[in-house]
Image (tube, rainbow, N blue to C red):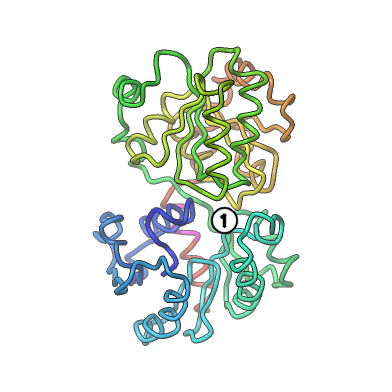
Amino acid sequence: MWCVPGAVGGSEEYLVRQLLGIPHTEFDVTVCAPKGFIAAHPDVANIHRIIESDHDGRSRPRRVLAESTWLYTRSNGAALVHHGGGTIPTRHRSPTVLTIHDLQYREFPQYVRSHKLAYLKTVMPRSARRADVIAVPTQFVRQTVVDAYGIEPDRIVVVQHGIENTLGMSATGEAELRQKYALGVGSIVLLPAMTHPHKGHLFVLDVMEKYWKDQGVQLVLIGAAGAAEDAVNQRAHSTKLNTCVKKLGRVSKADRDGLIKMSTALIFPSEYEGFGAPVIEAMALGTPVISSDQACLPEVVGDAGLVLPLDVDAWARALDIVESRRAQYLEAAERRIENFTATASGRALASAYRLALS
């Protein structure tokens, strides 16, 4: 119900990849989702039954009401109900699995709108205590949930992100992308993220201005508009950066995969992530990663990329370092990605279901 297509960021891919990987011979899954989910994810509809509500989920009050009424009725008779968006409605069925993607609202409350912050502060702790089992994407999030809410660790299951084996098969070719987006012939680095303040767009623009623009590289920004959209636009279109920064907004999956594949590196300077799916997407597509050392990112990247503190000077030589270690990083990524398949993610979710049913 929370998964509005195109509006919830990486958590949408997280859910979809779990649904594609879950062993459907063991579980008969019915997905209750907002209007438009089937059209956005026909691959899921080919595997599981999907029941759409009569609205698109963009109104939070309407969605919350529907979760306690329409969803409650629809879930009657289910052996288990999985709430994937971090909260459980007051009126709900048990046993229950709850996915908590992260606790960013606690670490960076300044990045959350006041009314949403008040809602999360009230509802998320209560939901965590109601859940029979909690699923989280990383050990980092697991520990933050234990510390924040006092949840017993044995009630929390790490369900890692997973990449489908078809990733990149329909990727747009480099020549077509260069022509379509006027990217020229030089090297590009890619930052794929909504323009939320914590995603680090302004940080990497500082790096571009101080160091990278003189190295002849072009920064490409893709992703939907977030709370920092105006600030990022103003900076990217400034006189100092407008010739070396391309802001493309939201692009198709085929174009996204193609842009990742053609990039010298994928840049991920985030202050906070529960997982950071673009990191493993880059690994799967053969592109080195440069990420911050914040939150879960060192755990996810491991030895398959360059992890740096969020200090502009520390990123000065990052592109040279990645180029010199490219073979090393790609070899490590090939090994590491085996832990992050859709099948592995689905199996981990299945283990959470079994625990809740036991």
- Front-most of residues 134 and 355: 134
Image coords of residue 332 (percent x, y): 56, 30
In the displayed structure, does residue 1 sit left or right of residue 122?
left
Q: Residue at x 69, y 43 (%)?
A: 294
On screen, 151 above or below 94?
above
Packing grade of label 1 (10 A; few <14, some 14-19, many >=20) is: many
Image coords of residue 329 (percent x, y): 57, 26
On screen, 146 above or below 95?
above
Q: Residue at x 31, y 26 (%)?
A: 180
Question: Can residue 346 be found in the magenta stretch?
Answer: yes
Tell me where the magenta segment starts and ends, as one range: 343-348
Q: Report the predominant secondary structure element of the magenta stretch.
A: helix
Count the marks: how many? 1
Image coords of residue 29 (percent x, y): 34, 70
Snapshot quadrant of residue 328: top right
Which residue in the protein does label 1 denote?
Answer: 137
Element class at badge 1: loop
Q: Residue at x 29, y 74 (%)?
A: 54
Image coords of residue 216 (percent x, y): 54, 12
Question: Can residue 181 be found in the magenta stretch?
Answer: no
Q: Residue at x 45, y 45 (%)?
A: 224
- Front-most of residues 284 and 316: 316
- Name the quadrant of the N terminus: bottom left
Snapshot quadrant of residue 39: bottom left
Name which residue type carries label 1.
Pro
On screen, 317 above or below 346?
above
